[in-house]
């Protein structure tokens, strides 16, 4: 079977958003600063989902070539 490590969203992106959100709540930064940090965090999450989808699609294509299902089970075995 194949396992893969999940790529974590950089802590700096999460911390930047949390800091901007707290600063906006206290009036130290404007809404655009808080929204920019939020959009950056969402961009990381979208990229992570796209990379995961790409990996799983590749595994689904490769599996039959090496005699396995996309879940790593041998072909022809009953569930």
Image (cartoon, rainbow, N blue to C red):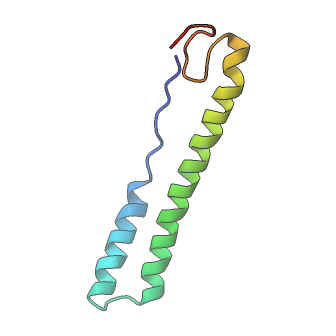
Left/right of residue 26 with respect to residue 47 in the rendered view:
left
Q: Residue at position x 31%, y 82% from top?
A: 23
- Residue 2 image offset from top left, x and y in percent: 53, 21
Left/right of residue 60 with respect to residue 71 in the rendered view:
right
- Residue 34 image offset from top left, x and y in percent: 42, 80
Judge whether 21 appears above or below 77 on screen: below
Q: Residue at position x 64%, y 27% from top?
A: 59
Front-most of 19 and 2? 2
Judge whether 10 appears above or below 23 on screen: above
Q: In which quadrant of the rendered view does residue 21 lie?
A: bottom left
Q: In which quadrant of the rendered view does residue 43 lie?
A: bottom right
- Residue 18 image offset from top left, x and y in percent: 33, 70
Left/right of residue 74 with respect to residue 29 in the rendered view:
right
Q: Residue at position x 61%, y 18% from top?
A: 69
Judge whether 47 appears above or below 38 on screen: above
Front-most of 78 and 37? 78
Point out the residue furthest to the front here. 78
Q: Residue at position x 28%, y 78% from top?
A: 22
């Amino acid at each position: 079977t194949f396992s893969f490590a999940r790529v974590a969203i950089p802590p700096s992106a999460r911390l930047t958003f949390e800091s901007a959100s707290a600063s906006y709540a206290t009036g130290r930064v404007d809404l655009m600063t808080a929204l920019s940090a939020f959009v950056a965090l969402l961009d990381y999450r979208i990229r992570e989902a796209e990379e995961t989808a790409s990996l799983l699609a590749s595994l689904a294509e490769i599996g039959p070539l090496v005699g396995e299902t996309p879940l790593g089970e041998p072909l022809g075995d009953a569930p």
